[in-house]
Amino acid sequence: MSDPNSPQDWNTLAERVACHVENYLSGLEAVARGEAGSHTVPMLLLEVSQVILAGAQLGASADVILPDNWEPEVGDDPDLDQVRQGLAERLHDLDEYVEVFDPYKDTEPTAYRLSDDLVDVASDLVHGLRHYQQGRPLEALWWWQYSYFNHWGNHAGAALRALHAVVANARLDVSEEAAVAG
């Protein structure tokens, strides 16, 4: 049995997560450009679901510890405002929703925007991807895991629930209308 904390296993996990991250980022950019057309919400549901799988893999892994607890500089993160704006335009009336962010600590729902949540996730993922692309898979894993627990995991989960509600309501409303008409 191999050691789950060996460099080879960390490299394998980093490669797997990087693939999810790249797919999420390219999918998000395509949706923001309008390439999903009338399938915007289902495509976003798919993209978020797949990146949450990467988060679950990070959450199920041992804590990633950097040597000397130090993260090397990766430079400025890219400006994702164009993606945020494109998503806000595509989501129209669906962009705003409410969520109980931490079901164990929060008692009141808070207003959120899907476009903000999706780009917040992207921003955290891009930061880790830059470590990965610079040949530092351990640093990438550390960042992805830390930011998953601290930030992007909550935003992705909230966005997933909101997107699921939109898709489920649309499908169930259609089914109910068809049953009434039949």
Image: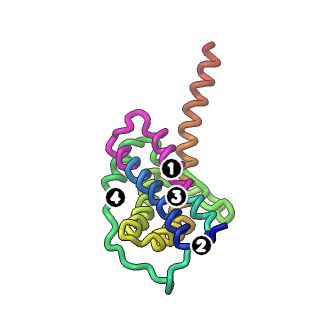
Q: Which residue is mark 2?
A: 5
Q: Amino acid at mark 2?
A: Asn
Q: Nearer the viewer, residue 22 or 119?
A: 22
The answer to whether marks 3 and 4 mark residues whose Cβ atoms lie closer than 8 Å is no
Q: Which residue is mark 1?
A: 48
Q: Nearer the viewer, residue 151 or 177?
A: 151
Q: Which residue is mark 4?
A: 80
> Which residue: 54% across, 37% down?
167
- The span shown in magenta is 28-54
Query: Residue 155, labelled with which disc?
Result: 3
First in sequence, mark 2 or 4: give its number. Answer: 2
In front: mark 1 or mark 4?
A: 1
Determine the CA span between mark 3 and mark 2: 28 Å
In the image, residue 36 lies in the stretch drawn in magenta: yes
Considering the whole magenta stretch, tell me its main secondary structure.
helix
Element under disc 4:
loop
